[in-house]
Image (cartoon, rainbow, N blue to C red):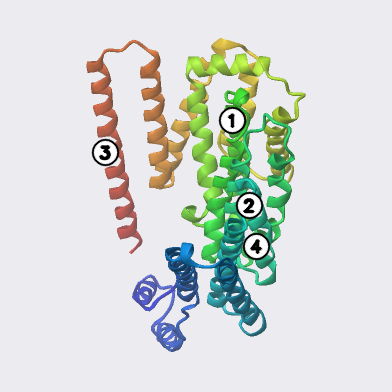
Amino acid sequence: MSSLSVKHLPELIQKGIIDHHTAEQIEQYLNNKPKSYGRLLAVFAVLGALLIGLGIILIVAHNWDNLSRNLKTILSFIPLVIGQGFVTYTFLKKRGAVAWIEGSSTFLYLAIGGCISMISQIYHIQGNMDDFILLWTLLGLPLVYILRSSMASILFIVGLVSFTLSTGDYSSANYKQYLFWPLFALVIPHYIGLFKDKSSNFLTFLNWIIPIGLCLVIGHLRESTKMIQFLNFLFLFTIFDLTGRGKSFLNMNLARNGFKVIGTLGIITVMFMLSFEDIWENLIEAFSKSDMSSMSEFHGFGILFLSAIGLLAWKLTRGKKLVGILPYGFILVLALLTLGKGAYLILNLPLLLMSVYFIWTGSKNSKLRTLNLGILSLSTLIICRFFDLDIDYVTRGIVFVILGAGFFAINLIMIRKKKQEVIEQQ
């Protein structure tokens, strides 16, 4: 939602929303209102902390080989001590200053990693990359709650995803591979607390970083279940879509709702991929041969399925109206799997109905984004079927030209329609 400014007042007067006297009072209030630079300072504080940390590392690295072991050890701890000093000062004196909170926590978070790596290098301490990332991530976690630092939570999630990806796939009996979920749960309370101020930029970042990170982790399953991954991702994207439809995301700009965007596009993408004969047949074969009793299989399939069906049931029991086929797409796919290899043809019908629904809804409500999504879905469905059917290149080219012209024409008509509606309202 855009903020009210002086330039909006003439339009509000013209539409009769406010009178001239009220407009003058609003203008006087806006002109006398002190400007806030908190967000801008927070951005520069984080960037400054990053640049200072990198600068110190480069300066020390230039003369590193010429320094004694004791001096190297002292230099390794200096950034950590400075960071601790900044954090202590922020905690005692600047607890309400966003710039100080984010800047000091970012500096200390980086200093922790730098100190661990330098001490390990100086004293030749053996270890794996995943152990280093895990230790660094855990030592930085307290900053999330001591200073209530959102930047620290972002670094924590990035580190946690990096740790999970560095542990190898789920084929080996390694407890580290399952640490992601309990550790990820530790940062959820801070993320939920950010919804008290939905205008926070850090909330926007986390709305995108969390689903992207979860996609990377789910995609890190064992090699033998790659075809089952289509179902895993379908469940995951359904969870994202249902989450993005929640009350906390109500009236939130779509660019800030990463769960809704990734969930919607993800469901559509997976369903289009499953509409290919080869992929569908390979999925059925892999599904019939998979061992759901093994922990790794259950981790990827069972938990995600139960989460998706549970969240959907919870939404429905609370009286939520879930319009469209997207929230029910995974149920449709599982039902079609029981029908055998030829059932992929049936999947084209709901994809067609979905595309038509988007086009109809976008046209009816004058929403270009929804309309274009429907046109893009319909075009994708036609293009996908080109790969299954033996159609000559000339025919394909003609269809592409028609689709492009139709895409342009419909958008032009919608834009003119919206302009006409604005003129009529005035």
The quarter holding residue 229 reads top right
Q: Position of residue 352 (x, y in %)?
A: 46, 26
Relative placement, left or right, of 197 versus 34 is right
Tag 3 residue? 409
The quarter holding residue 425 reads bottom left
Question: Three-letter amino acid code at disc 3?
Answer: Ala
Residue 260 seen in the figure: yes
Q: Residue at x 55, y 16 (%)?
A: 282
Q: CA distance from mark 2 to mark 4?
A: 12 Å
- The mark lying in front, picked from 3 and 1, is 1
Residue 140: image tag: 4
Q: Position of residue 3 (x, y in %)?
A: 45, 71
Tag 1 residue? 329
Q: Residue at x 40, y 73 (%)?
A: 16
Q: CA distance from mark 3 to mark 2?
A: 56 Å
Question: Three-letter amino acid code at disc 2?
Answer: Phe
Q: Position of residue 340 (x, y in %)?
A: 61, 11
Question: Three-letter amino acid code at disc 1?
Answer: Gly
Q: Secondary structure at mark 3?
A: helix
Cβ–Cβ under 8 Å for marks 4 and 3: no
Cβ–Cβ under 8 Å for marks 2 and 4: no
Question: Three-letter amino acid code at disc 4?
Answer: Gly
Tag 2 residue? 132
| Of residues 339 and 20, the one drawn nearer to the viewer in this rendering | 339
Q: Is residue 163 above or below residue 37?
A: above
Q: Position of residue 357 (x, y in %)?
A: 47, 34
Q: CA distance from mark 4 to mark 3?
A: 54 Å
